[in-house]
Image: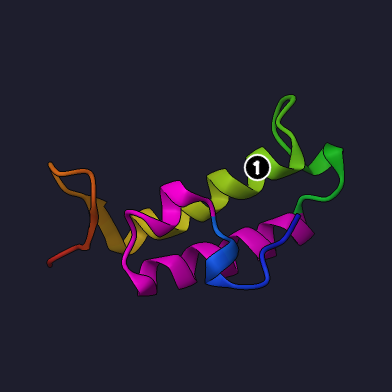
């Protein structure tokens, strides 16, 4: 199910990602939710929700990296 706001994101996202990264996650998740609604468009037996979460995390990882403390930070060039 798509998320309507940052407040609805899973705790694993809200508790560790900065606001901008949460916004990336939300937008990417919702986009993937729509894009992968048909099972034939997903890899393997992944559910629609699982696929959307994978896409969202991949989008976050383009600009952010996980620190030793478990929190995510903007990548430095």
Q: Where's residue 4, x and y in %?
A: 67, 71
Q: Please tell me which residue lies in front, 29 or 76.
A: 29
Name the image quarter holding the C terminus: bottom left
State left or right for residue 20 relative to residue 46: left
User: Number of marks in the image?
Assistant: 1
Q: Residue at x 84, y 38 (%)?
A: 39
Where disc 1 sits, the SS reads helix
Q: Pointer 1: what residue?
A: 51
Within the image, what quadrant is residue 74 found in?
Answer: bottom left
* Chain part drawn in magenta: 10-35
State left or right for residue 5 relative to residue 73: right
Residue 28 on the magenta segment: yes
Rendered view: 43 above or below 74: above
Secondary structure, magenta segment, majority class: helix
State left or right for residue 57 relative to residue 51: left
Q: Where's residue 32, x and y in %?
A: 67, 57
Rendered view: 36 above or below 27: above
Name the image quarter holding the N terminus: bottom right
Rendered view: 11 above or below 43: below
State left or right for residue 69 relative to residue 14: left
Q: Where's residue 38, x and y in %?
A: 87, 46
Residue 14 on the magenta segment: yes
Q: Please tell me which residue lies in front, 57 or 70.
A: 70
Q: Residue at x 75, y 43 (%)?
A: 48
Q: Residue at x 12, y 42 (%)?
A: 68
């Amino acid at each position: 199910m798509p998320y309507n706001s940052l407040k609805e994101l899973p705790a694993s996202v809200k508790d560790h990602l900065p606001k901008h990264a949460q916004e990336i996650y939300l937008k990417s998740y919702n986009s993937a939710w729509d894009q992968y609604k048909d099972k034939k468009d997903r890899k393997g037996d992944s559910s629609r929700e699982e696929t959307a979460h994978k896409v969202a995390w991949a989008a976050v990882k383009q600009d952010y990296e996980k620190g030793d403390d478990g929190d995510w930070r903007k990548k430095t060039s």
